[in-house]
Image: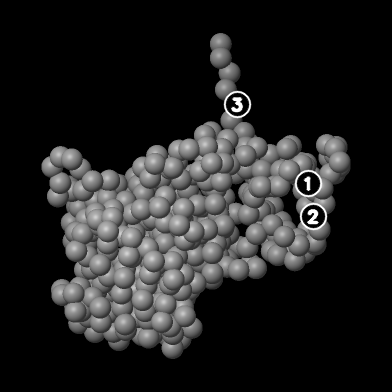
Amino acid sequence: MKIINATLRKTPGLHTVMCEGEHISAITLQSAHVPPQAGDIDAQGQLLIAPFVEPHIHLDAALTAGQPEWNLSGTLFEGIERWAQRKETITHEDTKQRAHTTLRMLAEHGIQHVRTHVDVTDPTLAALRAMIEVREETRHLINLQIVAFPQEDIESYAGGRELMTLAVELGADVVGGIPHFENTREQGVSSIKFLMDLAERTGCLVDVHCDETDDPHSRFLEVLAEEARVRGMGSRVTASHTTAMGSYDNAYCSKLFRLLKASGINFVSCPTESIHLQGRFDTFPKRRGVTRVAELDRAGMNVCFGQDSIKDPWYPLGNGNILRVLDAGLHICHMMGFEDLARSLDLVTDNSARTLDLGERYGIAVGRPANMLVLDAESDYEAVRRQAKARVSIRGGKVLMTRVPERVEFS
């Protein structure tokens, strides 16, 4: 396979990218536009990028909004209650069918790497068992990482520790947690120490729903970061949401950022979900309820954007388009300066790949997997401004998906 007339991010000029088998074999700078020959993919001067990455979604809950009841208050906690109702009725095939449908939506938008959180506070681990099958069945579309996520706690849920351990034994790739939802602060701290021990013992990655609240006294992020620092595990640890950081005072954040940078942990913000769920206990002024994305980024820490939900008890919208979330996040987080816009795709590509610890399994470079997108735009700025679509999706050196551009005719 040969892709010609491609613009590569942060690299001047047009390029030809050659693929042999499932890997990139050569990248050359063109001296001029090259006419296409039979079998060539002509990027037509548009961006050729590594695939989009979805670093945070809940496939087991996707497409369940309103079943059996809608989350009328719009709060995180009513969402958990509504999910507990729906969880009583899930079946193996129901979970798989919804996951397959959602993953196809993601793939249609150029996403080829996904990290999904799967609720393991269920004595049967039904959703986890289904998702392990989905992971194998969708390898042609997507690389799927599974997080063992204790939605109803580790320490406060009967048998929580045992279920987390079993989930990893069954094949979960990532250990999760939700310390701010535990009954007491002591249990929250204990849950972090337990999950970090489990990850260190098994070699799993870590991704914790951390301080997803507007409470400025919820400070489990410092516990997670210190555990990561002293164990030397920072690059393998992710703090998701951390929305309480939006309510921390600046004096505390000054100290906290020193620790966060020393720890080397990653951050995922889900801006559309957070701005919907948080601030619900405020009258006016209402907090945005989103973590300090711009500040983390400018301090040199790795931060990325995720969708979190697609039509579930926590968030009633969503369509799989990660650029929609990027657009909203840039608005919400005051990242609309041209320098931010000009590299904005980092927040849904390279930074997300680093969070998933993809390493040399990701990126456009010789020897790496031939997984790429031709995006209907010439730059990051134009991609986010126009909400550009993936025109061609290439996976393993083969065309996975093509999109015919829309044509509008005025009479």
Considering only vertical position in the picture, is 185 above or below 90?
Answer: below
Residue wearing tag 3:
407
Question: Does the image show residue 52?
Answer: yes
Check disc 2 and report the residue beneath it: 27
On the image, numbered disc 1 is attached to which residue?
A: 15
Q: Secondary structure at mark 2?
A: strand
Is disc 1 placed on a helix, strand or loop?
strand
Residue drawn 64% across the image and 50% down it: 49
Q: Quadrant of the N terminus?
A: bottom right
Name the spot of residue 224 as percent of width and height, x first.
34, 74
**Which label lies toward us, 1 or 3?**
1
Q: Residues within 10 Å of mark 2 (few under 14, many from 20)?
A: some
Task: Decide if residue 389 is in sight here.
Answer: no
Q: Residue furthest top?
A: 411
Q: CA distance from mark 1 to mark 2?
A: 7 Å
Q: Are marks 1 and 2 in contact (CB under 8 Å)?
A: yes
Q: Give the camera-side residue of 42 and 104.
A: 42
- Residue sitting farthest toward the bottom: 201
Q: Position of residue 118 (x, y in %)?
A: 37, 68
Q: What amino acid type should be assigned to the residue bearing mark 1?
A: His
Q: Label 1, label 3: how many angstroms apart (C-alpha)?
A: 28 Å
- Identify which residue is drawn at 24% across, 56% down: 249
Q: Counting residues from the N terminus, which is met first, the one under dot 1 or under dot 3?
A: 1
* Secondary structure of the residue carrying numbered label 3: loop
Q: Which residue is painted at 40% across and 52% down in the image?
A: 295
Q: Earlier in the sequence, mark 2 or mark 3?
A: 2
Give the side of residue 87 with respect to residue 235, left or right.
Answer: left
Q: Amino acid at mark 3?
A: Arg
